[in-house]
Image (tube, rainbow, N blue to C red):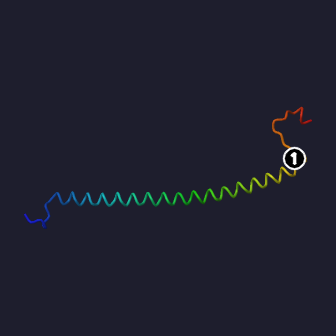
Amino acid sequence: MDPMQPSGPLDAIGALMGIFGLLSFIVTIFIVVLTIIFLFKAMGFMKRKLEADRLRNEQLERLIQLQPNHEINRYRTEEERT
């Protein structure tokens, strides 16, 4: 038997194993790329959220400064407020 000639079903099985190995490698690379994209999207979202939170906090500080009584006590009763 010549080693250069196909040996029937064993060559087909070897080819299938090679294709499945290549497909698993491609799927792994695809998942890694999606993970990297997700991380960059999440970082962009957090950057926008932090900026919006900072602006909201500045606006709240301005509203507090406009209050006639700067000391705000949420735990005062109605009788103490009058």
Measuring from the top left, give residue 35's x and y in whole percent: 48, 57
**Vertical comparison of 64 with 22: above or below:** above
Rendered-image quadrant of the N terminus: bottom left
Q: In which quarter of the image is residue 5?
A: bottom left
Measuring from the top left, give residue 77's x and y in whole percent: 85, 33
Residue drawn at point x = 42 percent, y = 60 percent: 30
Q: Residues within 10 Å of mark 1 (few under 14, many from 20)?
A: few
Residue drawn at point x = 26 percent, y = 57 percent: 17
The amino acid sitting under disc 1 is: His
Measuring from the top left, give residue 27's x and y in whole percent: 39, 58
* Residue at the far right in the pictured view: 82
* Residue at the far bottom in the pictured view: 4
| Residue to which mark 1 is pinned | 70
Residue drawn at point x = 34 percent, y = 59 percent: 23
Residue drawn at point x = 62 percent, y = 56 percent: 46
Closer to the camera, 27 or 68? 68
Kindly state the secondary structure of the residue where label 1 is placed: loop
Measuring from the top left, give residue 3's x and y in whole percent: 12, 65
* Residue at the far left in the pictured view: 1
70 with respect to 2 (left or right): right
Rendered-image quadrant of the C terminus: top right
Say how many tags the image has: 1
40 with respect to 75 (left or right): left
